[in-house]
Image (cartoon, rainbow, N blue to C red):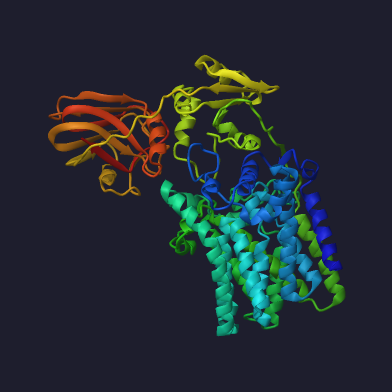
Amino acid sequence: MRRMLIVTAVLAALACAYTWPLVLHFTSAVAHDRGDPLLVTWLVWWSTHHLPLTEAWWNAPAFFPSTGVFAFSENMLGIAPITWPIIVVTRSPLAAYNTAFVLSYVLSGLSAYFLGWVLTRRHDAAFIAALAFAFAPYRLSHTHHLQLLSSYYMPVAIGALHLYLDDERPRWAALFAASWLLQALACGYYFFYLTVVALLWLAWFGIRELSLRSAIVLGAAWLVAAAALAPVLLGYRSIHDHYGFRRSQVEIVNYSADVAGLWSVAPESRAWAWLDGGASSESQQFPGLTVVVLAAAAVVLAARAREARGETAFYACAAVVIWTLSLGPRPALHGVPLGVPGPYAALAALPGFDGMRVPARFWMVAVMCLSACAALALASIESPRARRIVFTIAGLGILIDGWPSAIGVAAAPPMRVTRTVAVARLGLPVRETETETMYGSIVQDRPVFNGYSGYTAPQHPALLDMVEAHDTRILDRLAATSPIEVLVEWANDPDGGWRGWLDSYGAVRADGGDGWTAYMIPRTGAVAPPPPSGKRVTVNAITASTNQHDIGAVLDGNLDSRWNTPRQLGTEAITMDLGTVQPVKAVVMCLGAYSTQYPRMLYAEVSADGASWRLAAGGNTVLSTYDAALQSPREVPVTIPIERDRVRFIRLRQAAVDPHGWSIVELRVIQ
């Protein structure tokens, strides 16, 4: 116990030094920036604000009035044992976040220490594993991702498997299952990635060494943990299906690791900032020189000892396999595909993996494996004197490899308490204050129209476009049924443009103080028009001026197929032939998952003979897109009113030039 207290104290001191000066600003600042850290602070607050899995818990107050918003990102329940007591005692979600942030290094070190000790039964080797995992260079690229730093259940789970293999006591199976469950609740990526390495472990050790009875006990414990996790997974699945959330192949490829990531380091590195392979921050996988040398030494020493299927061989092979998986379905070097498929493509076909946007994050599992190799290398040295020398050099080398020049600290925005009777808040400018507005509303538990998360509510892009264009129709719509407040931070409005817009609109300055103003907009009654009702008309033929090959997708009844143009040139046209002259009430254009790709200027023209055309409707479709996304988030059915009696041909003509594409997943003609 005394030894563990010393180890904990050393890791805590190192963590405080590593994150300095954050420890001086636990209630007033966050590490790195105001983006993801404030989002996660908000998630940490909300995860303990309502009883988990209730409707109120899922309906987190961002992207108002969308429902199920908590399923747009991580739920952070796995770190609630740390954050909940702090929030209860201090009433400061920021203090809870920062405590969990600093403790992520301490607990990751302790968990790797546990794994290293289980593998070697040596405390010096275990401490090397602790340093290698807790202060790996990879963590420098993710100081703004608490969920990724919270990887401390992972080594405990794998260590428990080794202990179960040794004496097959049910308590070790239970420890594995509980650690797996908590890791899954701390980070959704690790639910999948830890499961993969656990299965690799079972294939390597379990099949040969576990008895049938022991395998059943382990499977039963894992099944109980999976049953506890199932309601969370089913909640996510239900909400994601409601919105049609999927990760595209393009996203998965773009967020896969690059081979050059092995020699790419975060610019915050004190020793290795000069080593820049050109990879993105997600792909910065430089393992550190010291750990590579130790892992190589472990492999060599194990080979000399003829341990072909021992722990060293497993962790070395697992690190390589995991790194290969992190390269995604199309491995690339400096962005150029290598021309060979990656094994991740097979995983992507399994349920759930299509929702994992960043295969590169597999690397944290490889970091754990390399840390285990480092411990095994030190334990293989027989000479006590040589082992002490290597321990000292390795410990210093690991810290030098992973130490930051400085951890950036960003002041947290103030929490604004207003005296208005508004039911929701809009923070301006929207794009620049998404997380600040979410965080600032915590103290009043007030819903906000702003939002930032792993997924975006489908109406949000249209809201952004209208607000940035100073289109007052969006203010009318936001306040259609209830009064709202609009909050402007003066620091984000240096020229007074946003305040001038609200003043000219007629919003009332209802509250404020030094550096901010809150405007009140009373209920406007400007509700969205109801969707069209009526009989659906069969389209006999359809043509498009561009991408004719895919135009049939808009009539196939499949919301996952689409017609699109890569950008709007102002010359696109789609013509439908109904076969006979008949009355038409409206055309419904479904955007599906592509709510950002609405036509910027659309004209609907009709004809009875295909020669003489009449204008039926025309204008910007941005407000209709906003309405449609709230009406049906999965379809986003934009209504184009026609209201003509003698129609055989309908032509949709896009007349704006815009860098966004134009996508349609379904077209429906309503009579």
Quadrant of residue 349 in the image? bottom left
Whether residue 386 is situated above or below residue 480 in the rendered picture: below
Quadrant of residue 609 in the image? top left
Whether residue 624 is situated above or below residue 292 in the rendered picture: above
Q: Can residue 259 be seen in this snapshot?
A: no
In the depicted view, which residue is nearer to us: 141 or 444?
444
In the depicted view, which residue is nearer to us: 287 or 213?
213
In the depicted view, which residue is nearer to us: 294 or 539?
539
Residue 191: give x, y in percent of width and height: 56, 61
Residue drawn where x is 67% and y is 72% of the image: 160
Residue 442: give x, y in percent of width and height: 64, 38
Residue drawn where x is 85% and y is 63% of the image: 6
Whether residue 445 is situated above or below residue 523 in the rendered picture: below
Whether residue 652 is situated above or below residue 517 in the rendered picture: below
Residue 473: give x, y in percent of width and height: 44, 23
Q: Can residue 70 be seen in this snapshot?
A: yes
Query: How many dots with numbers?
Result: 0
Q: Is residue 25 found left or right of 373 in the rendered image?
A: right
Q: Is residue 491 found left or right of 259 in the rendered image?
A: right
In the depicted view, which residue is nearer to us: 219 or 462?
219
Quadrant holding the C terminus = top left
Quadrant holding the N terminus = bottom right
Residue drawn where x is 70% and y is 81% of the image: 304
Quadrant of residue 526 in the image? top left
Residue 280: give x, y in percent of width and height: 59, 48
